[in-house]
Image (spheres, rainbow, N blue to C red):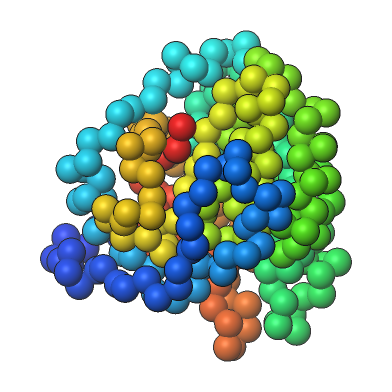
Amino acid sequence: MLAVIAPANNEEATIGMCLHEVSASPGEQLDVASRSVTGAADRPALTLGEATCELAWRRWLAGLRCPELSARDWLPAHARLVVVAAHPDDEILSCGGLIATHVAQGGRVLIVAVTDGEASHDGSPSFNREDLAYVRRNERWLGLRLLGLSQPRVLALGLDDGHVQQQGTLLLERLMTLLQPDDVVVSTWENDGHPDHDTTGQMARRACTTIGCAYLGAPVWMWHWATPGDDRVPWPRLRGLPLSAADGLHKQAALAAHRSQLSPRNLDLGAVLGHAIVERAAWRTEYFFV
């Protein structure tokens, strides 16, 4: 039986102690329509270093009071929810609660698996890429089952983990062939800070703009490198989706299925998903850029 990951709640922490300086520049914030297909490749990954703590975000977001999304208004039961995920677990971190909500109302869900996440343990002798890809595919399947999908529909594109930006044109072509105008599409935000996430979001938004799909970009690693009020983030576009207690628990259980990402990779390398990102996954609100 999988343990539910519970959020920490240390209210004695202060905002000043939680914030950190962001040393890496994410580059110019360009509109997706004007960026090149491989535009994310010229930005450094911002997923390393100390994370902005979860308590700082929770307090700041409470004061921000960003507009709320109502899933009933824009994701009817008859609509297909398409989640374009750069790596296994990104569908959980991006919108695991939304998936559970849609499944509960009888909705269809398609996961577009851009890569198998085979590069997450590079530098560790414990896994080779082929073995890790197998492990991560199984973790994805179990995680989706825990969100309520009895027979998860996953379309694997098989792009190279860590090199999605070099295959952006191919990704765009595949999305253009499978998306339909009445789909609701979610992917990682195109300025998330991980090159694979950035390109996935960029291509998903571009395909949706052309086809006419509803689209939401989910910040995942942005919460790591940005700070509250960061002027590199388009806060006026941020929307919150409240989750029920049940959907929040489903999301935490689904993330716990990704054990390879939650355990130290070796004596020198910690877990891919550290404490801060696990805490954020336990929030009772999911956030998206519109």
Q: Is residue 142 left or right of residue 56?
A: right
Q: Residue 285 at x, y = what percent?
A: 36, 38
Is residue 142 in view? no
Q: Is residue 11 above or below residue 109?
A: below
Residue pictured at 33% horizontal, 65% vertical = 52
Looking at the image, which residue sits at the far bottom? Answer: 268
At x 44%, y 56%, the residue is 222
User: Quadrant of the rendered structure where residue 12 is?
Assistant: bottom left
Residue 71 at what x, y percent from top left? 45, 21
Q: In which quarter of the image is residue 184?
A: top right
> Is residue 121 shown to the viewer in this render?
yes
Q: Where is residue 180 in the image (x, y as percent from the top left)?
A: 73, 20
Asked whether 59 or 239 is in front, the reply is: 239
Count of numbered badges drawn on the protein: 0
**Which sits in the foreground, 33 or 259?**
33
Question: Which residue is drawn at the image coordinates 37% and 71% (left, top)?
Answer: 22
Residue at 80% over, 46% down: 169
Q: Say which of 165 and 225 sits in front.
A: 165
Q: Where is residue 39 in the image (x, y as percent from the top left)?
A: 65, 55
Residue 116 is left or right of residue 18, and the answer is: right
Does 68 sit left or right of 133 as displayed? left
Q: Vertically, is 29 above or below 45?
A: above
